[in-house]
Image (cartoon, helix red, strand yellow):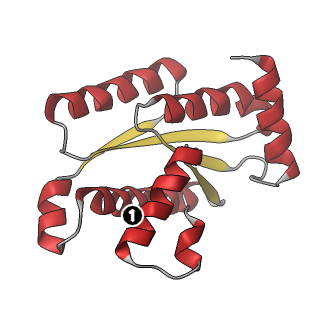
């Protein structure tokens, strides 16, 4: 991991008070480049930030074998990094159909429901607050803004993520 990037992330997290010492951090890991980078950065900064890292992966049941391979990759990566990891399998297509929503919207809803539940479980287990870390970039924000606009939104929805 590039030390300059590590230092910039560390400084930003401290400056913005993104977490407290000895806090649990629940990282949502998809297996894609952005979330893997997030996990590697958190692991590199773990001792400096004095945090405990946990990972959660949601397998949506959308992309068949490729999706299952992502779940296996995340499980193996977390094992190599000694990061406790929970994998949740959810049939998002079935739920989307039942709710009358798109796959993307339902997948996002399911992910955040699971992240919230896992964070609450960690808070109960450790008696301290838990932060949820997800890897979003400018493309994700633009996509979210377009999605909100297409669905019909006010000014607040145009803000994106």
Vertical placement of 72 versus 124: above or below?
above
Q: Is residue 160 left or right of residue 68?
A: right
Vertical placement of 142 versus 113: above or below?
above
What residue do we see at 48% from left, 40% from top? 55
Farthest residue, direction bottom: 154
Q: Is residue 131 left or right of residue 142?
A: right
What residue do we see at 57% from left, 29% from top? 37
Residue 25, how many percent across, how many down? 61, 47
Vertical placement of 121 versus 140: above or below?
below
Whether residue 115 is visible: yes
SS for dot 1: helix
Which quarter of the image is occupied by the N terminus?
A: top right
Number of numbered discs present? 1
Question: Residue under circle 1?
Answer: 113
Q: Residues within 10 Å of mark 1 (few under 14, many from 20)?
A: few
What residue do we see at 24% from left, 63% from top? 102
Q: Nearer the viewer, residue 90 or 101?
A: 101
Q: Nearer the viewer, residue 139 or 82?
A: 139
Q: Is residue 59 left or right of residue 150?
A: left
Whether residue 26 is visible: no
What residue do we see at 64% from left, 40% from top? 52
Q: In terms of image quadrants, where is residue 87?
A: top left
Q: In terms of image quadrants, where is residue 73?
A: top left
């Amino acid at each position: 991991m590039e030390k300059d990037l590590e230092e910039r992330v560390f400084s930003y997290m401290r400056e913005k008070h993104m977490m407290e010492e000895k806090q649990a951090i629940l990282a949502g890991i998809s297996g894609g480049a952005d979330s893997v980078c997030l996990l590697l950065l958190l692991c590199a900064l773990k001792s400096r930030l004095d945090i405990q890292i946990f990972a959660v992966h949601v397998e949506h049941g959308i992309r068949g074998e490729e999706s299952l391979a992502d779940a296996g990759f995340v499980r193996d990566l977390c094992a190599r990094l000694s990061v406790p990891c929970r994998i949740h399998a959810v049939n998002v297509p079935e739920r989307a159909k039942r709710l009358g929503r798109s796959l993307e919207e339902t997948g996002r809803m399911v992910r955040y429901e699971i992240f919230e539940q896992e964070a609450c479980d960690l808070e109960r287990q450790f008696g301290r607050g838990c932060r949820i870390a997800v890897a979003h970039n400018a493309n994700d924000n633009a996509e979210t803004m377009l999605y909100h606009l297409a669905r019909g939104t006010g000014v607040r929805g145009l803000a994106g993520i």
